[in-house]
């Protein structure tokens, strides 16, 4: 099969195509013919050498999410049949024409949805829902704040908040304000010209937000704490700001607040199965009703994956960058 294999790390030019052996499936695995995958910031970090190969016994093939059709099933598989349309998250390997995954980690593609659109669902929607709802405890009527509101995770978070009846503040660059408003964000803050701490105070009447989903880190952390309500939660899912900065931990005490660091990729397979199954049960039906939808910024051919990486690095996208594979 054809796959993108990392033999070195660096710029987009290290994304090289090779013919490699198709995965061998276990008795509870399915073999998926990948129709499409989608880019995530972690893909860029892995390409640059900041993530280890999740499958060190084989070639280093990036890619954290997929949509496709079942090509073969293990002897103990009961959930799927050959030809079924599936999607899901994986630790790596989605930049390939085929991949193997445990049957319970796969999810059904919503009825009527194109596979290339479905490829933009798993990573960002599970990340946003897990951070805001499962770990952050967000419920109807409460406030969330999400940084990078026009990103894949951000566009998913806006929709999830509106679907459950929560209110949301997002931050983004000036050119993406209207896109976030169109998705339903209650307050959109242009981080280049506005102070999100002040905007949160105005929107919430000085109470603050209940949950913050942050992919930035750095000097946002203390400002996040200032934006929190009493007993609020910060869920840190990324550190795009780079180097850490000093933190006055005492700021958390008066608000009885918490900061939780989380990643999806590095979790044990049992946890990935559990979160995928719960997401499929609680949230997938909302795609069929139209309450949730993947926001697709652009679609690239597999052969142009290096250009797609360059585009993501430019921060120009609103929503997901999808790669058609098959």
Image (cartoon, rainbow, N blue to C red):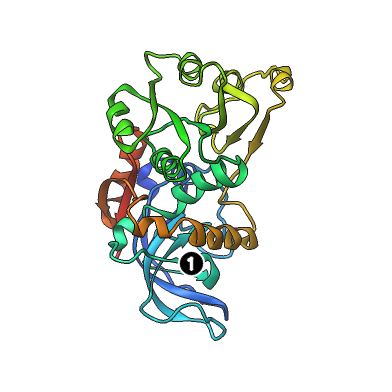
Which quadrant holds residue 288?
A: bottom left
> Could you tell me which residue is drawn at 51 percent across and 26 percent down?
241
Q: Is residue 2 left or right of residue 135?
A: left
> Could you tell me which residue is drawn at 38 percent across and 65 percent down?
109
**Foreground residue among 44 and 9:** 44
Quadrant in which the N terminus is drawn: bottom left
> Could you tell me which residue is drawn at 37 percent across and 13 percent down?
193
SS under mark 1: strand
Q: Is residue 25 above or below residue 326?
A: below
Quadrant in which the C terminus is drawn: bottom left
Q: Disc 1 designates what residue?
A: 106
- Where residue 291 sits in the image (x, y, percent)? 36, 50
- Where residue 317 sits in the image (x, y, percent)? 31, 37
Q: Is residue 212 above or below residue 118?
A: above
**Foreground residue among 259 and 101:** 259
> Could you tell me which residue is drawn at 55 percent across and 38 percent down?
237
- Where residue 191 sits in the image (x, y, percent)? 40, 19
Q: Is residue 273 left or right of residue 9?
A: right
Q: Is residue 261 left or right of residue 94?
A: right
């Amino acid at each position: 099969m054809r796959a993108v294999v990392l033999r070195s790390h660096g710029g987009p030019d290290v994304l090289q195509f090779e013919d490699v052996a198709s995965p061998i499936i276990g008795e509870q695995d399915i073999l998926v013919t990948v129709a499409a995958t989608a880019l995530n910031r972690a893909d860029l970090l892995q390409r640059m050498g900041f993530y280890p190969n999740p499958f060190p016994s084989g070639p280093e093939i990036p890619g954290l999410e997929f949509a496709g059709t079942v090509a073969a099933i293990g002897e103990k598989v009961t959930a799927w049949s050959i030809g079924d349309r599936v999607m899901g998250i994986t630790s790596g390997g989605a930049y390939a024409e085929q991949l193997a995954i445990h049957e319970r980690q796969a999810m059904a593609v919503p009825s009527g949805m194109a596979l290339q659109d479905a490829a933009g669902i798993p990573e960002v929607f599970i990340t946003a829902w897990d951070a805001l709802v499962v770990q952050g405890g967000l419920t109807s009527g409460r406030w969330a704040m999400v940084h990078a509101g026009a990103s894949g995770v951000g566009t998913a978070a806006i929709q999830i908040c509106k679907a459950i009846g929560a209110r949301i503040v997002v931050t983004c660059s000036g050119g993406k304000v209207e896109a976030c408003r169109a998705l339903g964000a209650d307050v959109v803050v242009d981080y280049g010209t506005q102070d999100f701490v002040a905007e949160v105070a105005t929107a919430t009447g000085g109470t603050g937000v209940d949950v913050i989903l942050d992919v930035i880190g750095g000097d946002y952390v203390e400002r996040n704490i200032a934006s929190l309500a009493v007993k609020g939660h910060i869920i840190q899912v990324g550190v795009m700001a780079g180097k850490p900065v000093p933190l006055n931990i005492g700021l958390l005490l008066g608000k009885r607040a918490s900061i939780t660091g989380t990643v999806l990729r590095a979790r044990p397979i049992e946890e990935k199965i559990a979160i995928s199954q719960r997401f499929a049960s609680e949230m997938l039906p909302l795609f069929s009703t139209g309450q949730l939808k993947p926001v697709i910024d652009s679609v690239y051919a597999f052969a142009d994956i290096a250009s797609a990486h360059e585009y993501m690095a430019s921060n120009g996208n609103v929503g997901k960058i999808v790669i058609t594979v098959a």
